[in-house]
Image (tube, rainbow, N blue to C red):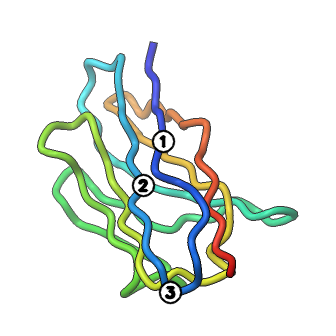
Amino acid sequence: QVQLVESGGGLVQPGGSLRLSCAISGTSFSIYDMRWYRQAPAKQRELVAGISSGGSTNYPDSVKGRFTISRGNTENTVYLQMNNLKPEDTAVYYCRIVTAGSHIYWGQGTQVTVSS
């Protein structure tokens, strides 16, 4: 059974940093695509970072220059480094992967709250 477990969320002051981790287990298929999404209360889930199997990354303008997605040394972990956090970054952050065969898996999410 494929499992994605996010960690690293919490409460941080504006301007602060957090590093989210997503630990992946239970799949023997190659992971083609890794992404981080977020969902704030009463808002749709939105993409905040993606990284392909080749290492190409993409970000929306709202986080570009502040967030960095990266893979661990194995395929089992993906990270999201978030700097210069703003109150509008407050949301539940989710990890998502796409494996060979176009199987999509989501984690349960980790809460990030940016507040003074």
Residue under the point 54% across and 37% down: 106
- Give residue 6's mark: 1
Q: Are marks 1 and 2 in contact (CB under 8 Å)?
A: yes
Give left or right: position of 5 versus 23: right
Q: Earlier in the sequence, mark 1 or mark 2?
A: 1
Residue under the point 46% across and 51% down: 8
Quick one: quadrant of the N terminus?
top left
Residue under the point 36% across and 17% down: 26
Q: Secondary structure at mark 2?
A: strand
Q: Residue 24 falls in which quadrant of the image?
A: top left
Q: What amino acid is found at the position of numbered circle 1 in the picture?
A: Glu
Q: Position of residue 47 (x, y in %)?
A: 55, 64
Q: Position of residue 5 (x, y in %)?
A: 47, 34
Residue under the point 57% across and 71% down: 12
Residue 71 vs 3, above or below: the answer is below
> Which one is closest to the eye, mark 1 or mark 3?
3
Q: What amino acid is found at the position of numbered circle 2 in the picture?
A: Leu
Give left or right: position of 10 versus 29: right
Q: Are marks 3 and 2 in contact (CB under 8 Å)?
A: no
- Give residue 15's mark: 3
Q: Position of residue 11 (x, y in %)?
A: 61, 64
Out of 68 and 16, give the one closest to the viewer: 16
Most extreme residue toward the front is 116
Real-space Cα separation, disc 3 to disc 2, in angstroms: 16 Å
- Give residue 45's mark: none
Q: Earlier in the sequence, mark 1 or mark 3?
A: 1
Q: Secondary structure at mark 3?
A: loop
**Residue underneath mark 2:** 20
Q: Secondary structure at mark 1?
A: strand
Most extreme residue toward the top is 1
